[in-house]
Amino acid sequence: MSSMNQTVNGTTKQPRKPGWWYPYIFVAGFAVVVGVNGIMFYYASSTFTGLTTTQAFEDGLAYNKTLAAAEIQRQRGWQVEFGVEASPPTSAEQQSRFAEVSATFLDRDGQPLSDLTVNALLFRPTAEGYDVSRVLTHVGEGRYVAPVELPLYGQWELRLIGSRGEEQHQLVTRVIVR
């Protein structure tokens, strides 16, 4: 007759009951959740901050001025046609994307505006450090152009600012460069 009990150093050891390891499943599950949350916390706090302005309080106080400037811009009636045309990469190793930013400014009556200073700012809405700024050159008939080298493919926010003295026209839009 064999016994399921084992004797070790004069003590009888009972066999483990079925399911003895179930509590360890719960402990392991919680350890996985804590580990994943730790990884997510690290990446959330060490990557893009989401900060779009460093002067949020001042911008908030100037909100009425911003609304007034937008109304003046609307009343001025300038019309803007813009484009960002990408050129294909010249080699497989080329990581940057070359493009041409263009804008045509017309007054309320459709006449070209040829005496403007036009600036273009392209920035990534989801990543810091890739901003590109260019002054566009007037090429005639109210059309302004500038070549630009973008470090990444994808979605960019384009901010065009055409100014003449105290008058300023601003256009902000999203573009995709492929």
Image (spheres, rainbow, N blue to C red):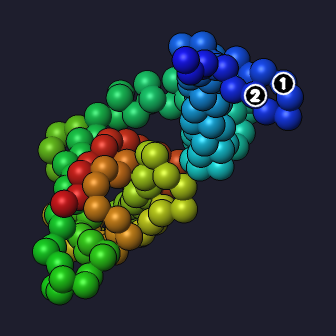
Q: Nearer the viewer, residue 64 or 86?
A: 86
Dot 1 amino acid type = Thr
Left or right of 111 on screen, residue 3: right
Left or right of 75 on screen, residue 83: left
Residue 69's x, y, as percent? 51, 31
SS label for mark 1:
strand
Q: How many marks?
A: 2
User: Residue 18: in sight, yes or no?
Assistant: yes
User: Residue 60: in sight, yes or no?
Assistant: no
Residue 85's x, y, as percent? 17, 63
Q: Disc 2 marks which residue?
A: 7
> Which numbered dot is residue 153?
none
Residue 60's x, y, as percent? 67, 25
**Residue placed at 52% from the left, 23% from the top?**
67
Query: Given contact means CB atoms under 8 Å apart, are the residues at marks 1 and 2 in contact?
Result: yes
Q: Disc 1 marks which residue?
A: 11
Dot 2 amino acid type = Thr
Residue 53's x, y, as percent? 63, 41
Quadrant holding the N terminus: top right
* Mark 1 neighbour class, 10 Å CA radius: few under 14, some 14 to 19, many 20 or more: few
Image vertical order of residue 102 relative to residue 37, above or below: below
Left or right of 26 on screen, residue 123: left
**Residue placed at 60% from the left, 18% from the top?**
3
Image vertical order of residue 64 relative to residue 173, above or below: above
The residues bearing labels 1 and 2 have C-alpha atoms spaced at a distance of 5 Å
SS label for mark 2:
strand
**Residue placed at 73% from the left, 32% from the top?**
58
Question: Farthest front residue?
Answer: 1
